[in-house]
Image: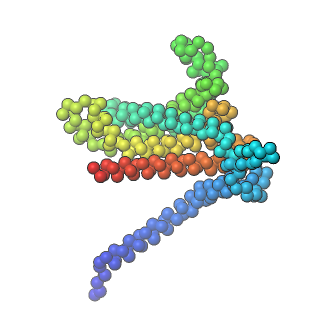
Amino acid sequence: MTQTAQGPGRDLSLQQQRQRAAFWFIAPMLAALFLVAAWPLLRTIWFSFTDTSLDNLYGGQWVGFDNYLKIRTLESGRVLYKGTLVDPAWWNAVWNTVKFSVVSVICETVLGLIVALVLNAEFKGRGFVRAAILIPWAIPTIVSAKMWAWMLNDQFGIINDIMLNLGLISQKIAWTASTDTAMMAVLMVDVWKTTPFMALLILAGLQMVPRDIYEAAKIDGIHPVKVFFKVTLPLIRPALMVAVIFRMLDALRIFDLIYVLTPNSKATKTMSVISRENMIDFNNFAYGAAQSTLLFAMIALFVSAYIWLGKVDLGGESGK
């Protein structure tokens, strides 16, 4: 009767077999990701270094960094700068995108935290309220944008009617048409729609906090506000960080909401909108590809910095 070999060698062989099996299981997913994500991204980056247009997608010539920055010296000696990096419209779109992302994420995080704390409490009908709060997030963005476009209409919108009856305004406001209020209107709709998403992620973190901690704090007579800042907030910090990074990534590439509500407003035109405008409307396909590439680079830098700062913070805590 033979004995099966035991020891480190067998464990290593079994581990290698599991790793190979795991690779073959995820190989189809990796292939699908390459086809639907990596390949289009690489093609877009390639197009940004050519003079490709919609009329000639496969015959573009290599032009190097001209779509990003082209320096030309005229006969008069004057230096002319062209390209995305010196385009005022592009930098206006960058500013709009950053402003929208920062303001919307801060508002949605604060409101989402409040909603999550309410939903985490024990009360009758909590399950129904949890389901109902997700309705704005479940509605497709195009549908909610169209719905709010009617509500914000300056002639027959219900928002103006309510504010007039309450005496908050003296005349009707063209929320989506005026440069003064267009960004405010977009932020209003986005906060209404996406706050439930933030609340859902934060609520998942709150559900992981042991109830014994709160019972002990209550017995010791610690004020609830102090419990929140000293206990709850540190414990849900990982969930909060995940929620913020997911929402920030989504906000930086915002397109559909702005394209429906304020498609031609300079006050709300973001990087995604201006990139699509150049690629499709103006037939500057390569120029729009360069702008898309810069948007991708900005998002990649943000994610890398966010992860790096998170690691530094965690390392500092572990060293204490």
Colouring scheme, one of rainbow, by chain, secondary structure, one colour = rainbow
Image coords of residue 287 (percent x, y): 70, 48
Residue placed farthest to the bottom in the image? Answer: 1
**Residue 288 seen from this side:** no
Callout count: 0
Q: Determine the image quadrant of residue 153.
A: top right
Q: Name the residue nearer the viewer: 130 or 7.
A: 7
Q: Determine the image quadrant of residue 268.
A: top right
Residue at the image position 65 percent from the left and 55 percent from the top: 45
In the figure, 59 relative to 133: above or below? below
Image coords of residue 225 (percent x, y): 29, 30
Residue at the image position 63 percent from the left and 39 percent from the top: 91
Residue at the image position 31 percent from the left and 76 percent from the top: 8
Q: Is residue 280 left or right of residue 142?
A: right
Q: Name the residue nearer the viewer: 310 or 115.
A: 310
Q: Determine the image quadrant of residue 252.
A: top right
Residue placed farthest to the left in the image? Answer: 220
Residue placed farthest to the right in the image? Answer: 75
In the figure, 190 relative to 289: above or below? above
Image coords of residue 289 (percent x, y): 67, 49
Q: Name the residue nearer the viewer: 75 or 259.
A: 75
Q: Is residue 283 left or right of residue 30?
A: right
In the figure, 158 relative to 306: above or below? above
Q: Is residue 296 left or right of residue 87?
A: left
Q: Is residue 122 left or right of residue 81?
A: left
Residue at the image position 29 percent from the left and 86 percent from the top: 2
**Residue 75 seen from this side:** yes
Classify the position of the N terminus by image quarter: bottom left
Residue placed farthest to the front in the image? Answer: 77
Image coords of residue 229 (percent x, y): 31, 35
